[in-house]
């Protein structure tokens, strides 16, 4: 088998881990749901640092985030698309739960 200590840990954690035979790829959506929630929280906090909720300057603060903040465009797009991914994952997660019981 593996002799390197790190490879032993990886092998025992991922390769030789005993799992039930009824687990399929549909069971990944719960973990993906948690990942989406973490990404939404982190990107939302970063966006909130630069957003101004005033009626006269809200649009210009979003434009400022998109244009002037480093990687602001990426954070905003991750947050916007992350919301869609969250709902896709939650619908699939609930659907799997209803179908498989």
Image (cartoon, rainbow, N blue to C red):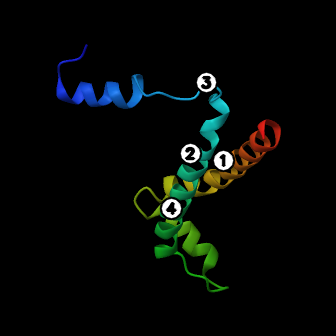
Mark before the other along the chain sequence, 3 or 4: 3
Q: Is residue 7 left or right of residue 46?
A: left
Question: How much space separates mark 2 and mark 4, taking CA atoms?
Answer: 18 Å
User: Residue 85 got which mark?
Assistant: 1
SS at mark 1 in the image: helix
Q: Could you tell me which residue is drawn at 68 percent across and 45 percent down?
A: 89
Find out whether the residues at labels 3 and 4 contact each other: C-beta distance under 8 Å.
Answer: no
Mark before the other along the chain sequence, 2 or 4: 2
Residue beneath disc 3: 21
CA neighbours of label 3 inside 10 A, class few (<14), some (14 to 19), many (20+) = few
Question: How much space separates mark 1 and mark 3, taking CA atoms?
Answer: 28 Å
SS at mark 2 in the image: helix
Residue beneath disc 2: 31
Q: Where is residue 45 in the image (x, y as percent from the top left)?
A: 49, 69
Mark before the other along the chain sequence, 2 or 3: 3
CA neighbours of label 2 inside 10 A, class few (<14), some (14 to 19), many (20+) = few
Q: Which residue lies furthest to the right in this view?
A: 99
Point out the image quarter for the C terminus.
Answer: top right
For the residues carrying marks 2 and 4, which lies nearer the camera in this image? Answer: 2
SS at mark 3 in the image: loop
Mark before the other along the chain sequence, 1 or 3: 3
Between 11 and 58, the residue placed more toward the observer is: 11
């Amino acid at each position: 088998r593996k002799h390197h200590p790190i490879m032993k840990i990886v092998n025992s954690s991922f390769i030789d881990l005993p799992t039930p035979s009824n687990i399929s790829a549909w069971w990944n959506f719960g973990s993906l749901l948690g990942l989406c929630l973490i990404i939404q929280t982190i990107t939302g906090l970063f966006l909130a640092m630069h957003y101004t909720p005033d009626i006269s300057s809200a649009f210009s603060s979003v434009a400022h985030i998109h244009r002037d903040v480093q990687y602001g465009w990426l954070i905003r797009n991750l947050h916007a698309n992350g919301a869609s991914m969250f709902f896709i994952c939650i619908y699939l997660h609930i659907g799997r739960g209803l179908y498989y019981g």
